[in-house]
Amino acid sequence: MNQGGSRSEQTCARSFPPVRPGRAEHRTPWESAGAPHAAAGPAPSESFVHPALLYRDEAGYRAGVGGFVSTALAASEPVLVAVPPSRLEVLRDSLGPLFDGVQSADMTGLGRNPGRILAHLRAFADQHAGRSVRIVGEPIWAGRSPAESTEATRHEALINLAFRGRAATILCPYDVAGLPAAVVAEARRTHPVVTEDGITRPSAAYTDPLLVCADCDTPLPEPVTFRELEYGGGRLAEVRALVQEWAGAVELAQERRADLVLAIGEATANSLAHGGGRGRLRLWTTDGRAVAEIRDAGRLTDPLAGRARPSLTGADGGRGLWMIHQLCDLVETRTVGPGFTIRLHMALGGGPAAG
């Protein structure tokens, strides 16, 4: 499978030497009007800025995120806020009528599968080409599973590649009081700038995005029992039949069953085209989810593949991975050893997994 992706909360936590020296600290450039602050380096109109906001309570959220949004609106910059519903309510209350000028999204739906988020952010920026945009994205919240947090960490690292050179500021809030310490540590590695207690400074822990993605390629837990099929050319109809039969037996909802069949079909077809012409499919259930794993001899050569909407012609590649990300509740990828592994998760029962 030769189409880009990358790595998992445990959370890819590995110590690396700092790659960027610290500079003088300063107040955040998005504090509310009247709050003292010093010059904050490049303005959003001049470069891409990707700060993490480490907040501890609702007051810190209102000040940090509310101030960021208010400053953008005052400058007539387009604003997208993608956060969990409870945080949307905090901002709506804090901003009052100003909130009507904000494009918002429920991150627990949009980001249920973290692999979907980046395309939404890029689409918003593309809608306002030639203008500086501001985005608030909160992809990890209390209650996220370790697997989800890992893929969200991968997403945070890849933002730095996807938006490099673009006129955008993407603020990512992290609930220090509610999240595991390992998740907060990863935030310092995936964000060049960190704001904490009202002070903004370069992150001494910031790490090359590809190294972060490599660290996320931790071993996946092995299932206890599973169905298995090795496939090659001429056996995709057999794959489809097995998946349909198995999905019905594990009580996957009818509409989700069709989604899973399509997603697995895309993954196994990629094995034939890009993964050495053959692969192995395993199917099992765990924690209220149906899981399909596809392994082949391919490599992910583009870490952003599948995270941008493909063109109608498909000439830019990544169409199969794009569809997989849209169809599944969680997509885990691993590029280790001699090949590529992708795990597709779907919630059992009548609907998609909760965020």
Image (tube, rainbow, N blue to C red):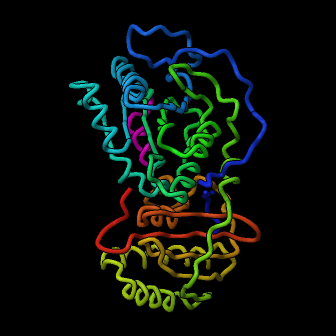
Query: In terms of image quadrants, where is residue 156?
Result: top right
Q: Is residue 296 positioned above or below 30 on the image?
A: below
- Comparing 317 with 341, the one in front is 341
Give the position of the N terminus as an image quadrant: bottom right
Q: Is residue 349 left or right of residue 218?
A: left
Q: Is residue 234 left or right of residue 62?
A: right
Q: Main SS type for the magenta part?
A: helix
On whether residue 123 falls in the magenta region, the answer is yes
Residue at the spot 21% in from the left edge and 25% down from the top edge: 97
Q: Is residue 87 positioned above or below 146 on the image?
A: above
Q: Residue 90 location in percent, x, y?
A: 30, 33
Q: Residue 245 location in percent, x, y?
A: 41, 90
Residue at the spot 63% in from the left edge and 76% down from the top edge: 295
Q: Which residues are magenta?
A: 120-130
- Comparing 88 with 82, the one in front is 88
Q: Is residue 188 left or right of residue 123?
A: right
Q: Is residue 35 positioned above or below 52 on the image?
A: above
- Comparing 295 with 92, the one in front is 92
Residue at the spot 37% in from the left edge and 37% down from the top edge: 81
Residue at far left of view: 97
Total marks drawn? 0
Query: In terms of image quadrants, where is residue 298?
Result: bottom right
Asked whether residue 77 appears in the rendered view, the answer is no
Q: Residue 255 location in percent, x, y?
A: 31, 75
Q: Residue 49 location in percent, x, y?
A: 55, 29
Asked whether residue 296 appears in the rendered view, the answer is yes
On whether residue 23 falls in the magenta region, the answer is no
Residue at far front of view: 177
